[in-house]
Image (cartoon, rainbow, N blue to C red):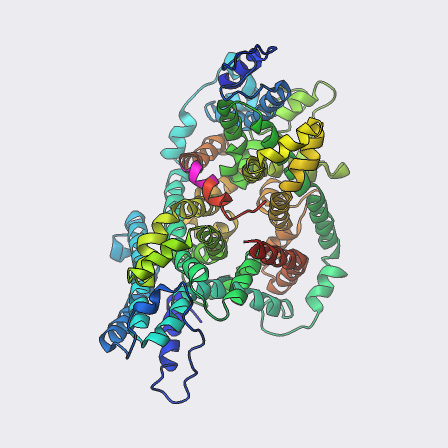
Amino acid sequence: MSALTEDVRDVAPSGDAPRAGRGLMADGRRRNPIAIVVMILLSLLWIVPTVGLLVTSFRDRDAQNTSGWWTALWTGGWSFSNYQEVFGGRSDLGSSFLNSILVAIPATIIPIMFAAFAAYAFTFMPFPGKDIIFVSIVAVMVVPIQVALGPMTDLLGQNGLGISGQYIAVWLLHTGFGMPLAIYTLRNYMVTLPTTVIESAKIDGATHFQTFWRLIVPMSMPALAAFAILQFLWVWNDFLIASVFLSNENTTVIVKLQGLLGSQGQGTELLTAGAFVSMAVPMLVFFSLQRFFVRGLTAGAVKG
Amino acid sequence: VTTTTEGDVGRVDDPRDAEPQEPGGTPPPAPPGPGDPGSSANPGAANLPKVGIGLVGAVAIGWFVYNAFLAFAYYPEWFFDSKVLIGLLALVAGVGGAFAFFYFINMFVEGLPGRWSRALMPYAFVSPGIALISLMLIYPTIQTINYAFANDESTEYVGFDNFTTIFTGDLSEEFWLSITNNLLWLLLVPSITVVFGVIVAVLADKLSARGEKFSKSLIFLPMAISFVGASVIWGTKPGGVYKYDSAEEAPLGLLNAVWRIVGEPVNWLATSNFRLNSLLMMVIVVWLQVGFAMILLSSAIKGVPEDTIEAARIDGAGEWQIFSRVVIPQIKGTIITVFITVVIMVLKVFDIVYVLTTGRDKSNVIANLFYDRLINFEQTGVASAIVVVLLAAITPILVYQVRHFRREELGR
């Protein structure tokens, strides 16, 4: 917050000198008091619910049920016991956390390989049917995954392949469901790459496979990362597919949390700690790769 | 088609059928394009070792990966029952397998005579991805439409019975309630999200670099949070914003703590007057989505050329006029993209409602009704009919999406 509150203090009629502070910012623009006040309010509004969760997760059961989290500073009740319970103890949130990792990482990385090859062909190779196939992919992106649930439970369940309940079922489904967006995002980024690179690779006698692997993949890293982040968030945070296609011992932390949310009394004090743990990983991924995300998603993907 | 890998291998056979040695093979459709780097490879006859190794390799890899993955599911004891080991092996087999598979397919196609090689290479690159989409999205869509006209065990066709059940029969009340709620979601959530997104993007742009980065981080933090996690944050459990507490106790939920200033504590998510519970759940979704809207809109706003704004300023336009007449028209495309994305999300909104109210107190939505029928009641027929309605509702957006895409392509 300090950066923002400082801004407020610095709002004063500006002098002539284009220095930072004194009503002008480092880049010489004038400070805008309305923007500063509104943004502080919005930022607070957006962060307070999460802060409530964080504070509550560090309070014991008694404190959680007798006073609001905003009184924690003077009523106390601080404790690490919820986190200890989540990672050890009687709850199986700890093992479901591991399940989440084991589900999310392969389900994030495997689709990228397939999608990148397809995106390369859609961008750099002329072939009959290209337009109609790509337009179909654009259309399929909109189809709700609910349509797949019934037929896929039949196909993967006991009367089909019999892999429902295992990680592989979910890897497979996420790979398929993520594919249209993956191809679309990567292709839109590849279109923005300079064609001269491909031309010179051709003159040097490179095959498509070499061009793809040595040139296009490294150059497409921002888009690959952007899709990887989106897919990871989507898989990690998914409830629908995990709840239908994973057995109880393989299920993810999100499904376990839903179970706790539905239960009365017993174990609900763990809910906040569990929820916070479940949010920590995607937030870490998101914020460490944020710059790729913005670049990969906005270059070519959206045109104003 | 039963599995992905089999599907892929099946597609490898197609080019072989079309080899020129075979009588009746169709001529290669595509002349080499100007930007086609493959043209230097193998101009004359087939390179048989390459064709052979490529084909055998691709089939072997496909077979191996397929069986390895089944083994992970059927015989975990082979891997010492270690989930971590299985996860690691799956990652290696999945990524390495996909790479090796493409490598061999590429080798196979490269080994074919030049013309064939050039004509088939794009399909070799595209077909594994397309096969996955066909198996996981296109086939189920067709099958679901099929199921919608069959009984709940999918053993017999029943005509339009399932649709009668949801439109006018036993389920009609709940169905129309859900449709109304979905419409309400559709009316409010996308537009509010876009408005907030624009406000935040515009105002953040006016802050110092540090302030902009910091406030944006706080606002798109919820993007990383799951619907279930958000339900814990906002819900009725300890620490939740909407937690209900009777008047005698100290306030535990933030909203009731504020509300107590003017009135008695309210059980928010059980209040269906004016669809209050639905509205409160919409707040959660807006809270989750504004960060996404902001990212896209912010980069669009930064892309508005400075000279157009300067020109307006010189002509004497005020800040509001600049915003509404210069900036907004130039970011219209992005606004539509964000709007459509949120519309699609809202049409199938599910997790939040399922977790917080399970559709009680008049808060049901289509996707939740569907889940309830499919999973809890095992009524495949009725559930499929509900999805078909959802699919029909999405079709106009789908058409729009395709048109929008085509227009954009023309502009490239």
Q: Is residue A9 left or right of residue B313?
A: left
Task: Out of B186 and B39, give the one closest to the viewer.
Answer: B39
Q: Is residue B275 left or right of residue A134?
A: right
The reply to whether residue A167 is visible in this rendering is no
Q: Which residues are magenta?
A: A289-294
Task: Out of B388 and B74, give the one closest to the viewer.
Answer: B388
Majority secondary structure in the magenta region:
helix
Quadrant of the rendering where the C terminus of chain A is positioned: top right
Which residue is rendered at x = 66% and y = 46% of the image? B359
Q: A227 above or below B308? A: below
Residue B252 position, x and y percent, is 60, 23
Residue A52 shown in magenta:
no
Residue B326 position, x and y percent, is 67, 36
Residue A290 shown in magenta:
yes
Which residue is rendered at x = 36% and y = 52% of the image? A217
Q: Is residue B164 left or right of residue B339?
A: right
Which residue is rendered at x = 55% and y = 47% of the image? A302
Q: A243 above or below A75? A: below
Residue B400 position, x and y percent, is 65, 56
